Image (cartoon, rainbow, N blue to C red):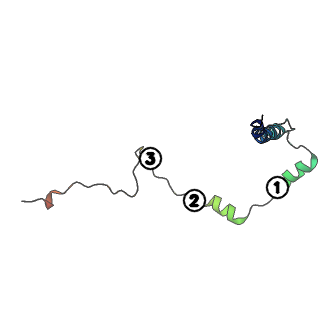
Amino acid sequence: MEILLWWLPPAAVTVIAMLWVSWLGRARDVSPDRSEAAQERFAAAILRELPSEVTSRVSAPRPLRERSTGIAVRPSQKPIEPPSESSGAA
């Protein structure tokens, strides 16, 4: 019977964890806030001017990307050039 007392703390922790998880997963109202105040905050945020660093970054020209060949080449590896015929032994 004494061995059952060793099972009491893990069983209590398990029950508490089950209750906590069931409380976290409860059904809640997740509908969007459609109040008048929320709509006014949204309108104010949309009409606000963007900072100049954001607008300059958006309007800056983007660098052209190199076309992918589908072959992965590590940039640290240099291509191997075939030996030229002028350096050969005569």
Give the residue at x 64% y 58%.
58
Q: The residue under label 1 is which amino acid type?
A: Ala
Question: Looking at this view, is 27 or 61 the one in front?
Answer: 27
The residue furthest bottom is 52
- Residue for badge 2: 61
Question: Looking at this view, is 52 or 34 the one in front?
Answer: 34
Residue 86: image x %, image y %? Answer: 14, 60
The residue furthest left is 90
- Residue for badge 1: 45
Q: The residue under label 3 is which amino acid type?
A: Ser
The residue tagged with tag 3: helix, strand or loop? loop
Disc 2 packing (10 Å; few <14; some 14–19; many ≥20)? few
Give the residue at x 89% y 51%.
40
In the rendered view, would you say 36 is above or below 25?
Answer: below
Q: Are marks 1 and 3 in contact (CB under 8 Å)?
A: no
Q: The residue under label 2 is which amino acid type?
A: Pro
Q: Choose mark 1 or mark 2, whichever is in front.
A: 1
The residue tagged with tag 1: helix, strand or loop? helix
Residue 77: image x %, image y %? Answer: 36, 56
> Quarter of the image containing the N terminus?
top right
The residue tagged with tag 2: helix, strand or loop? loop
**CA–CA distance in space, label 2 to label 3:** 21 Å
> Quarter of the image containing the C terminus?
bottom left
Residue 44: image x %, image y %? Answer: 85, 55
Mark sitting earlier along the chain (1/2): 1
Left or right of 44: which side holds 7? left
Any mark on residue 68, and which? 3
Any mark on residue 66, and which? none
Question: Looking at this view, is 47 or 27 the one in front?
Answer: 27
